[in-house]
Image (cartoon, coloured by chain):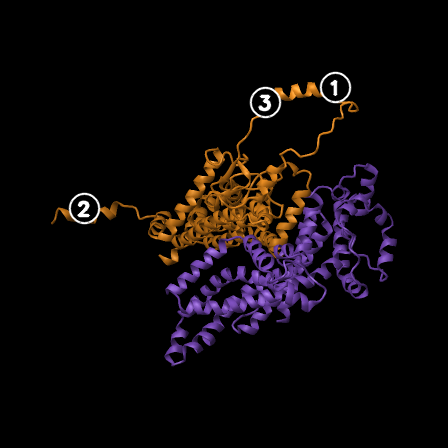
Amino acid sequence: MGAYVIRRIGQMVPTLAGVMLLIFVLFNTVGGDPALVLAGKITNKEQIENIRKQLGVDQPYHVQLGYFAFEVATGFTCTWRSFTAKPEAPKSDGKAEAKADPKVDAKADPKAAAKQAQPSGCQAVRSWATNEEVPMILATRIGPTLTIMIPVLVLETILAVLLAIGVAYLRGTLTDRMIMAICTVAMSISFLVYIIVAQYYFGFKWGMFPVQGWSDSFIKNLLTYAPLPIMLAIFVGLAPALRLYRSFFLDEINNDYVRTARAKGLSENKVMLKHVMRNAMIPIITNVGIALPSVFVGSFLLETFFSIPGLGREILVAVNRSDFPVIKAATIYLAILTMVINLAVDVLYKAIDPRVQFK
Amino acid sequence: MSAVMPTTSAAPLHQLSPGLWTLAWRRLRKDRVGMVSLVIVGFFLLLILGSYTGLVAKDWSKEVGVSYANPTFMAGAENLEAKQAGAKQTKSEVPYVDLSDIDPLAPKYEEWAKRTAEIKITEVQRAETLPFGGDKWGRDVIQKAIKGAETSIMVGLVAAFLATVIGTILGAISGYMGGRVGDFLEWFYNIFTSIPYILLILAFAAVFQSSPALAEYKGIPMVVAILAFTGWTGIYRLVRAEYIKHASREYVKAAQAIGASHSRRMFVHILPNVSHVCLVQLSQHVVQFIKAEVILSFLGLGVPVDSVSWGTMLAEAQSELVIGKWWQLVAASISMAVLVTAFSMLTDSLRDALDPKIK
């Protein structure tokens, strides 16, 4: 197994290099001159040239690519230190300020500015809009995202498995067909509609939940602000999961071992929950494994509607104000996370299914 | 007796055995759900063809009703917004004070009054109610929904077609050629799949939006490009698997023996045999992309503000709901839900009809 893990990690290197290359090509060439994007409405040639120098985009492409790789690496080493060393930097008020003050002040002497902010001597990439350190932004936004997404993943999987095994047991009956029809219709209504309607009725009209908001206390968040978004996400995710898991159970339910188990005289509960469930869990866990990385991205729609200061909303805000460093960092770090999670899921298989051989 | 025999037994000898598509069509004809969804999808396609050529919903942008005109079936409901808008036009009751001795403009009043009288004022009678209500500017919600359907469905169709073409060509090359080329394309595929899908879309959106070179393609072509460039991976994987299977089959070797070139073998000989996979994928992606377009447009990353799509309608509807004007939300979400339900059921039926395993 050790050899397998090492080989898989070895395979990650070219993929990661490819991800960085893709991001680099996208943001440095397809997106136009990054200096002009940062400069915004500034037309002063000298200032633009200045920005270009500070960003390093006056260098040839291979040098820029080297810088970029360096930035990604320093992000890693700095995050932990800065995360433990100092609390979140005060957030400035977005684009207007950042664009009016074209970083020339802050960036004229970047080393001094960095030293002032960072006693540890680490210098990570900073957001164009807020001048916060990008790894810090990502590290502080992941908490709220996980507060929403982990309960969603856990509850949704449990609910979907239980419902699916019931529906699969009743296959072909009117109940089964009705539930499947409802699922198809429920899946075709946009997530937006569910959010708009639920926020209006549950939050605004009936006042059962706060319309939006977030606090500093984890317990309060989980009990007051999170329930409505969590319920919405589960409600929307349940229909496709139920359909899929039902098909997994149906694949198993007609197998010979099920007949054997029944012939032995086992109760229906035991046949379904022990024999069928165990085998159907393998594709289900694959599916949960595929969904796992998206837990960290979060639902940017939910976070936007309910003003949850999570990663998804942060990325969306960054897209809206062309804050390239934030988008680049989020993409790369989440890609790395995705690869690591995929490896972990593949290794976990062995524990669930002894038939799996590592190739 | 003997006269009947030849006709019955000879007929099958001269008849070609039905091909894949004929058989699939026969199976689809028997599938009642599939046929109903086909009719609904066909109706929507006719509708958007009509609105594209200007036969239907030509006047969607005309402000025919009062602001937030009520639907006809609830004509009696109070419409405060329209009243307020009307109230602004009535004269204010300020006591008249003669200022003509100190007013420097006083001599010109007479001339102005004459000129004003020359201008013809046509009073537009705005409807109090519209068949299914009006939006803030008094535009008919049904016509807006039809026009929105045109945008959303067009984006879905074109983007899905492009993604299928990209996925099929790359998958064909990778699966058929194998070796170095195959490895390279696998690497390329891994790059795209190791970035979480939402992030990939947002990264492309951020870059395309800030790119000065692509500024003239902003709006619909840009959404299509974003969806197509990020959505081809699933199709690639399936097509590649099919091509690996087919590449070593006898008919391909026979084609090689008669001197068919690689590209001829790939796209003339093998492609028809995997085209059913492509068709089902195309159909699935249309649904997926329509949903994605609605969300992108809602977030302001999609179609421009001056055109209308289901997503922009939902964006307007969110604030309308708070003042009790629900009809635009209902019009957009129902028309979208009907189309998406029908399209996904059609996809299921297509897959059943084309899957040779169920034969």
What x and y, as percent, mark residue B150? 50, 41
Which marked residue is nearer to the observer: mark 1 or mark 3?
A: 1
Q: Chain of mark 1?
A: B
x and y percent of residue B73 in the render?
A: 45, 45
Q: Secondary structure at mark 1?
A: helix
The residue beneath circle 3 is B120
| Relative height, residue B217 to residue B315 (above, below) | above
Mark with earlier residue (3, 2): 2
Report the residue marked by disc 2. B7
Return the residue nearer the eye: A6 or B282.
B282
In the image, what residue occupies the spot 44% across and 48% down?
Answer: B275
Chain at numbered mark 2: B
Q: Which chain is purple?
A: A
Residue type at numbered disc 2 = Thr
Instruction: Identify the residue position indicated by label 1 in the image.
Output: B107
Local crowd size for mark 1, using a 10 Å CA cut-off: few (<14), some (14–19), many (≥20): few
Three-letter code for the amino acid on which mark 3 is drawn = Lys
Q: Earlier in the sequence, mark 1 or mark 2?
A: 2
